Amino acid sequence: MLFLWITPHVLLVAVAAVVWKRRLYREFPCFFAFVLFEIAEFILLFALYFVPGAGRQYAYAFSVTLLLSLALRFGVIHEVSRNSFRESPFLKASARRLLQCVGGLLLAMGILLAVYAPGSNAVRWHAGVSVVNRGAVMVQCGLLLSLLLFSRFLGLSWRRPAFGIALGLGILTSVDLAASALRAEFASNAAQELLNLLITGASLVCVSIWFGYLLAPELKPVSVAVVPHEEVETWKREFQHMLRH
Amino acid sequence: MEAGVSTHAQALITAWVLVAVAFIALGIVVYVAVRSRTRRVDLEGVVSAFRSLDIEAFRNLVDSAEEAFLRKNLSPRQFREIKRQRAWSALLYAWEAGRASTTLAKVGQAAQRSSDPKIAASGVQLAENAFQLRLQTVRVSLHLLIEILLPGLQSRSLPPFADQYERAAETLFSLGRFSSEVQGSVRPKSA
């Protein structure tokens, strides 16, 4: 369990180093802030975990940092979508409208869920945090899914770092959604342990994806003169033929 | 007591529904990741897809004057049947144009990264036209679906899909011309 808790954060330090070295923090400042925040959060929570009698402080620190982390994740999603559509003014406007609609719809669903299925956790504030977390990850998961599907539908080519960040976050938020839905209903220690295991496992996968994609070199610009001239002539003939119709 | 049990059951159902949704989302994310590993864009496929689409035939299928003629000369039942078939054929055109525009967008984006400024500029234009064409095909498809479901309704004018299609084709043609000038072209890649 400790291994799964520590490893993703050690890898996060490596991710932060890669972001710094490749100067990706200029393009993804919010993501960089998120990574640094996650590392700082881990240090704080890890220290509190081993302090005897600091259970209450640990729980409060966990809740506050969770809410801040959720807020930063929204920033990362915004950053990734802005980065993906930056080369097309038309898409920038269309994607913004789509994501606003999806975000609004999911937010309404999250609020309805919070009102009608507030969970059965015995500790009131903990239940509140769980429900807020569930609503927020639902919106985030929906936004990332819409972003990936919309891009795929349009045939949009992503830049590697943006795609890696979206992919990792997509996996993390979908597992987080399942875990937070169950966490709101099952408060037993065994269930919580199992769900913690699930989340830390997903974090490890997510951070590994970030590390892999951020470390991989960007695809080289496409060179000319790699396709035979005859192939271009075939294109030309085909399109001239088509335009004559 | 019963109300409490029922509320608890509802909450449990909600939780499991969310778990199912989360795993479907996870499946889609993994699918998108795996599919986006495909590197090469099938240029021959784009050419043959564009070639196979007879845009004039599409225009005839959605021509309002022709529809008015059919409405006037056929019985209502026959008219509904014919209109449904025409709308279905037009929908297939729009669907294929949409698929071709997705590949066209990839070609445009690959050309965008070219070191030749002419090809890069043409690529920007091509990608932009392809994105617009893709979204137009969605609007047209929805419109045609309504016509298939309710053939008796008076048709409203379709979004300017055919014009957008021709614009995209023209840009693709100019990209081919620029590439030809430098004795080569682009081999697109995606993330």
Image: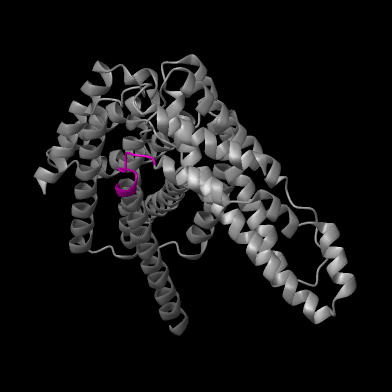
Q: Residue at x 36, y 58 (%)?
A: B22
Q: Would residue A57 be seen by someone viewing this image from the given angle? A: yes
Magenta highlight range? B34-41
Q: Residue at x 22, y 27 (%)?
A: A215
Q: Nearer the viewer, residue A166 or B68?
A: B68
Does the magenta portion include A66?
A: no
In this view, B38 is above or below A29:
below
- Most extreme residue toward the bottom is B2
Q: Quadrant of the N terminus of chain B?
A: bottom left
> Horizontal placement of B157 versus B114: left or right?
right
Between A12 and A64, the residue placed more toward the observer is A12
- Name the residue: 38% across, 66% down: B15
Query: In the figure, B101 relative to A27: above or below?
Result: below
Say whether residue A233 is left or right of residue A207: right
Figure quadrant of residue A35: top left
Check if residue B38 falls in the magenta segment. yes
Give A240 or B130, whichever is nearer the viewer: A240
> Residue B77, position in %: x, y?
79, 81
**Picture quadrant of residue A239:** top right
Give the main secondary structure, helix, strand or loop, of the magenta stretch: loop
